[in-house]
Image: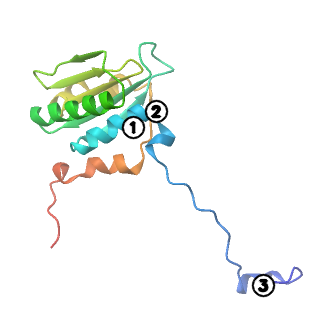
Amino acid sequence: MKQNSTVKEQSLNPQPAVRSKPQAETCETVLDERICAALHAASEKKAIEPVVLDLREIASFTDYFVIVGGQNERQVQAISDEIYEQLKKAGETAARVEGYKTAEWILLDFGDFVIHVFEQKARKFYDLERLWRESKRVELPAEFRDASTSSLNSDRTPDM
């Protein structure tokens, strides 16, 4: 379009705007690769409602809490096992594992980050998100946000 064209002509013949595609947000662009590996492992075992809390500004004992849930004790143990094995393959060993036998709340301590795998009732009871509300909640990529709407967590039946 001509540079000296009128506003009316420009509005009647708009030029397409040039927009760059936003880069897809991946876990690795937001978080440490070890935390991403833990989230992927939990996702493989259908963990529900993953949350990552950034504690760097308010705690000295760890940098992040990774909180995930399971429907029952067996699933909680399966999630914990998968996280432990995947991080072990990556060369990261948990310094401490607590609560595995009862599987109500399993804690895996990796130093820089602590993973909490809860059975649903225990997660609501202990409510770590509320206790650590002064921490920053890390915005997770869509691949993990969508996990909370899985078929395990939904009362709806699919339309056929």
Give the structural element (helix, strand or loop) at label 1: helix
Residue at 49% x, 39% y: name it.
Answer: 30
Residue at the spot 67% in from the left edge and 77% down from the top edge: 16
Label 3 sits on residue: 8
- On screen, residue 65 above or below 50: above
The quadrant in which residue 158 appears is bottom left
Q: Are marks 1 and 3 in contact (CB under 8 Å)?
A: no
Residue 82 in sight here: yes
The percent coordinates of residue 25 (x first, y second) are 49, 49
Question: What secondary structure is found at the residue carrying circle 2?
Answer: loop
Secondary structure of residue under mark 3: helix
Image location (x, y in percent) of residue 139: 44, 41
Residue 19 found in image quarter = bottom right
* Residue nearest the viewer, comparing 115 with 92: 92
Alpha carbon distance from label 3 to label 2: 52 Å
Give the residue pinned by disc 2.
32
Which residue is denoted by mark 1 in the rendering?
A: 36
Q: Is residue 75 above or below residue 55?
A: below
